Amino acid sequence: MTRATQAAVGLHVLIMISVLVPPLVVRATGTTVYLETAPVDPRALFRGDYVILGYGIGRNALPAGEAQQPRESGRPVYVTVTTERPARVVAVGSERPEPGPGQACLIGRSRGDGTVDFPQIAQYFVPEGEGRAIEEQRGEDLLARVSVSASCNAVLAGLEAR
């Protein structure tokens, strides 16, 4: 193998590692938060078995007058929540917060109607054939276990019964 080929292979390996490691670090070292799920009705032919999750903490999180500006500018919305089971909203804002003890923050996106979506933790891939059972359980009976880093990045670690 030539040096150029070795360098190209090494670069590709580094790129793959740089994509895989950050979510693993968040999962291993992040603060655990339990969010109530909300029903959403997704359909996609080519994605495999997965469930789209909505979260109750995002509903009407922003006052109607403040919801359009983050949507139009594309700026993230930061939602500070408690680490209780289930989590409760403490504050919502456009600046990255400094969560206190027993708190964590999530990065969201405004829909413009006061609702905040959380794209980082919206999809949960499941073994083939299990998606329908989870879809029926969403809402009052299902909590999402989410690991959150100090920089508000979130990884969906699993789903649990209430």
Image (tube, rainbow, N blue to C red):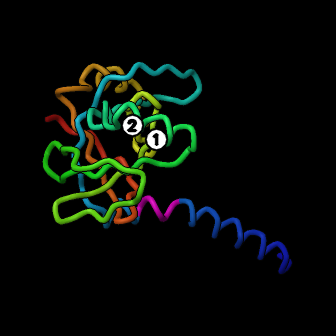
Where residue 92 appears, as percent x and y from the top left, is 32, 47
14 or 39, which is in the foreground? 39
> Considering only vertical position in the picture, is 117 above or below 77?
above
Q: Quadrant of the C terminus?
A: top left
Residue ID at (56%, 44%) = 74
- Can residue 51 be spotted in the picture? no
Q: Compute the Cα span from label 2 to label 1.
A: 5 Å
Q: Mark 1 and mark 2 in contact (Cβ < 8 Å)? A: yes
Where residue 63 appears, as percent x and y from the top left, is 34, 35
Mark 1 crowd level (few <14, some 14–19, many ≥20, 10 Å Cα)? many
Which residue in the structure is indicated by mark 1? 109
Going by the picture, which residue comes out furthest to the bottom?
Answer: 3
Residue 21 part of the magenta-drawn span: yes
> Considering only vertical position in the picture, is 140 above or below 83?
above
Where residue 119 appears, as percent x and y from the top left, is 46, 41
127 or 77, which is in the foreground? 77
Residue ID at (57%, 66%) = 18
Q: Quadrant of the N terminus?
A: bottom right
> Considering only vertical position in the picture, is 156 above or below 112?
below
Instruction: Give the amino acid type for the residue marked by disc 2 in the picture.
Output: Val
In magenta, the rendered stretch is: 20-24
- Can residue 102 be spotted in the picture? yes
Mark 2 crowd level (few <14, some 14–19, many ≥20, 10 Å Cα)? many
Main secondary structure type of the part rendered in magenta: helix
112 or 28, which is in the foreground? 112
Disc assigned to residue 116: 2
Where residue 126 appears, as percent x and y from the top left, is 39, 34
